[in-house]
Amino acid sequence: IDLTYNDIGPKGAIALAHALRDSGIRDLLLSCNNIGPDATQYLARVLSEGSTCLKALDLSKNNIGDTGVTALAKALPHTGLEELSLDLNRITEVGVVEICKAVKSTPTLVNLSLGANNLTNASAEKLAELIRSHPLRKLNLNLNDFTNDGIFYLAEAIAESVTLEHCSLKQNRRITDLSAEVSSYTTSLVTSF
């Protein structure tokens, strides 16, 4: 079900969460619906029951913040989700820590999108740990606030991953020219094999 840009709000999200129970809905796209953290907590409770068939959930641009993400994180291990999109939700390191812990306990989740959340290098370290310990295939980290150090944490983990097929780091505003550093980094990676 694609309900993107419908402004269903918290009441609509709660009603939809009720409808998800024991339904055959596999994809739920709720981007840009002004759901907020309280309705996200309710949706997370329904997801934690394990009574849905959801494989893909997009909650991008819903102002769910760390409160909503923490609730989702608790529910994740009880789901069969394969894809989770949480772009533009004002998630901080607090939320990233919770989501990374949860993803590690959710073997089915292979696509994660956390773009445009102003994540910093502290988040990059946690995400690097996730890349090393979980079989992610796609990771979107566009439009965050990583510096060169954060990119190096991620690059080391990406180099070690055998499952990650795509990691997008476009438009991270605080990255400077990395050409010399990347060149020496890749040379040391190649010589270490």
Image (cartoon, rainbow, N blue to C red):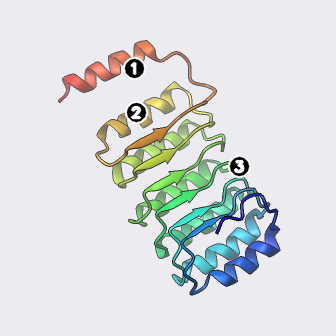
Q: Residues within 10 Å of mark 2 (few under 14, many from 20)?
A: some
Residue at x 72%, y 53% (from the top left corner): 61
- The residue where tag 2 is placed is 155
Vertical placement of residue 56 versus 129, above or below:
below
Residue at x 23%, y 24% (from the top left corner): 190
Q: Is residue 186 left or right of residue 169?
A: left
Quarter of the figure that contains the C terminus: top left
Vertical placement of residue 172 versus 119, above or below:
above
Q: What residue type is labelled 2?
A: Ala
Q: Which amino acid does label 3 sit on?
A: Arg
Vertical placement of residue 163 versus 13, above or below:
above
Please identify the quarter of the rendering in which residue 184 is found.
top left
Tally of marks: 3
Residue at x 63%, y 78% (from the top left corner): 45
Residue toward you, 141 or 119: 141
Rounded to the nearest whole Å, what is the CA distance between mark 1 and mark 2? 9 Å
Q: Is residue 4 left or right of residue 56?
A: right
User: Does residue 40 appear in this view?
Assistant: yes
The x and y percentages for residue 8 are: 80, 68
Q: How crowded is mark 1: few (under 14 residues within 10 Å), some or many (20 or more)?
A: few
Tags 2 and 3 touching, CB below 8 Å: no
Tags 1 and 3 touching, CB below 8 Å: no
- The residue where tag 1 is placed is 182
Residue toward you, 117 or 11: 11
Tags 1 and 2 touching, CB below 8 Å: yes
